[in-house]
Amino acid sequence: MTVSDERGRRIASVADEAPLDTRVRVPWPVDVVRTLRPLQRGPWDPCHRVVAGVWRTSRMNTGAVTYRLTQDGPHGARCLAWGPGASELVDRLPALLGADDDPSGFVPEHPLLVEVHRRMPALRITRTGRVLESLVPAILEQRVHGVAAFASWRRLVTWFGDPAPGPAPEGMRVPPSAATWRTVPSWEFHRANVDPGRARTVVRCAQFADSLERLVHEPAADARRKLRVVPGVGVWTAAEVAQRAFGDTDALSVGDYHLAKVVGWALLGKPLDDPGMIEYLEPLRPQRYRAVRLIVESGGYAQVPKRGPRTPITDHRRR
């Protein structure tokens, strides 16, 4: 079998496995690429590529899966899925594409939010239902530059993940299982530029993976609170997981190095700190994360003035 892009150019081929071919519809308009964008951890994420649609890998309860999602009308997508987890992935597709995300309660007053919301009616909040797959990269992104965290994620998944089932763009891998994360040696984390504190948190979360995965069945606010019981998982990390795994439209990433400034410059023309951002966005509960997504998608980061030298990227491998 050959998988090609819209111009007929070959992306990948496989001779011995036919995909599970599914079309899914959701109640609201959905932009597949934009809706799934928060799941990508850097431009070279081995679990997420945007080429002729969105290619992703995941580890379902029933096994690994590779899938390709392409836009199929304003309310749906076509999915080709390979691997033992394909059927389970297909069952999760509506939530992944925002079927559980009801935007009707979002009524902003700020002109920028009103305009961006009008221009992007197909921006949905995804819900993967996979906690550890969101939690590990969020831990790696704690207190470090994004470029360094993305590189650590790419190295660890490449070294310890499994080959992607079926066809996939070159270099794609399935995220490691909880059992594998529990056994990654400390020196391998070090080789991937992950300090001992973050490494211990990854291993600790992998040890509680079964309990953490069950949090998807609880109200999002309760699930966030229970995530924070795990040592090393704070407000920011829990919010990052809730946004992706729980589809939490109110999960605000308090403690992010840039976010408060981005929100402030976009909405007020001046920087905010975390308390200022929380106060200003309070009227938008329970849709604060949706507001942030709209700001980011509208180019909010570009509005922050570039002033002063950037802080250096720490290389823990030299320590």
Image (cartoon, rainbow, N blue to C red):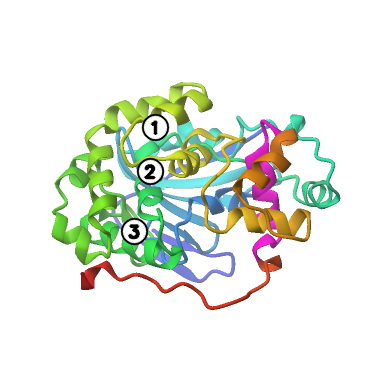
Per the rendered image, the range of residues in magenta is 285-301
Q: Are marks 2 and 3 in contact (CB under 8 Å)?
A: no
1 vs 3, front mark: 1
Disc on res. 227: 1
Q: Earlier in the sequence, mark 1 or mark 3?
A: 3
Indicate which disc residue 187 carries: none
Q: Is residue 12 left or right of residue 109?
A: left
Question: Does residue 288 show up magenta in the picture?
Answer: yes
Which amino acid lies under the numbered mark 2 shown in the image of this protein? Leu
The residue positioned 68% from the left and 30% from the top of the image is 102
Residue ID for mark 2: 135
Residue 5 lies within the magenta run: no
Left or right, residue 116 beside residue 176: right
Q: Are marks 2 and 1 in contact (CB under 8 Å)?
A: yes
Name the residue tied to disc 3: 153
Q: Amino acid at mark 3?
A: Trp
Quarter of the figure with residue 300: bottom right
